[in-house]
Image (tube, grey):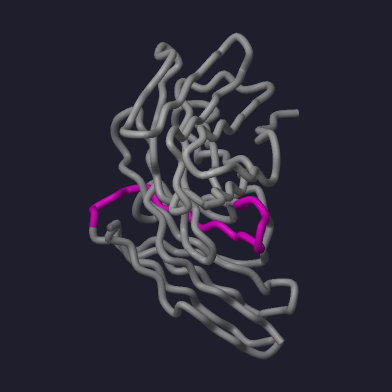
Amino acid sequence: EADIYQTPRYLVIGTGKKITLECSQTMGHDKMYWYQQDPGMELHLIHYSYGVNSTEKGDLSSESTVSRIRTEHFPLTLESARPSHTSQYLCASSEASGSVNEQFFGPGTRLTVL
Amino acid sequence: SQKIEQNSEALNIQEGKTATLTCNYTNYSPAYLQWYRQDPGRGPVFLLLIRENEKEKRKERLKVTFDTTLKQSLFHITASQPADSATYLCALDPSGNTPLVFGKGTRLSVIA
C-alpha cells in the first residue's frame, strides 16, 4: 500500500466556492503530480512539482494553482469552482533519482460542483 | 503529434484464457514503458516496467514485451481470473525526466 493520502475523498460544493484538495506522502519523494480523470477517460496532468518551491503546469489548464512548501505536501486550490471542474482528482508521487519513474497514486478526491 | 494508443476500450475474455492488451505509441523514443492497473474509483497501481533494451519482462502471471521498432508494447495476463478485471494503462516517459504520459487504458473483463 502506497503511503500517499488525499483529503477529502468526496466533496460536493456550490459554484464560486474556493476549495483546496490536500495531498500528502510519507515516502520522501521529491516528485509529485496532480491529475484529473473523468469516469472511463484518460488521466490528464494538471500540475507537477520536482521539489520544494518548484511547480509546473501540465497539459490541462484547469484554472487551479498548487504550492510546494514542504516535500511531503502538495495541495491543489481552485479559486472559484465551476460545474466543469466536476471530476476525480488524483495525486501521485515518485522518486527523483534513478531512471525509473514509477508513480504511486493516492485514492483520489471525487469533486462535484453544483 | 505524439500520442499513445491502447488497442481497444474494452476486452472481454473467458476465465483461464490469456488476455493480450496492446499499447502503441508514435513520435516518442522512450527509454522504458510502464503498465498500471486501475480499479473503478481508485488510483492506478504500478505493475511492471520494461526498458528499451529488454524484449520481455515477467512477473507471476503477467508478461510484457517491448518492440521499439514497431513502437509497441504487449501486456499479457495468463490464466486470467475474474479478479483481473480492471482497466490497464500503459505509460511512458517521453524524455527521461518529464512526467509520464498515460494511455487511455483498456478495460478488461474476465468472465467466469
| Residue at (57, 41) in percent of width and height | B102
- The spot of residue B74 in percent (x, y) is 54, 25
Q: Quadrant of the C terminus of chain A?
A: bottom right
| Residue at (35, 46) in percent of width and height | A94
Identity of the residue furthest to the bottom in this view: A14
| Residue at (31, 33) in percent of width and height | B60
| Residue at (63, 87) in percent of width and height | A17
Q: Quadrant of the N terminus of chain A?
A: bottom left
**Above-or-below relation of A15 to A84:** below
**Above-or-below relation of B103 to A62:** above
In the shown orientation, is residue B108 left or right of residue B46?
Answer: right
- The spot of residue A82 in percent (x, y) is 72, 79
In the shown orientation, is residue B45 left or right of residue B27?
Answer: left
Q: Is B72 inside the magenta-drawn segment? A: no
Q: Is A37 inside the magenta-drawn segment? A: yes
Q: How many numbered marks have been drawn onto this rendered protein structure? A: 0
Query: What residue span does the magenta drawing correspond to?
Result: A27-44
Question: Closer to the camera, A51 or B13?
Answer: B13
- The spot of residue B32 in percent (x, y) is 45, 24
- The spot of residue A5 in percent (x, y) is 35, 68
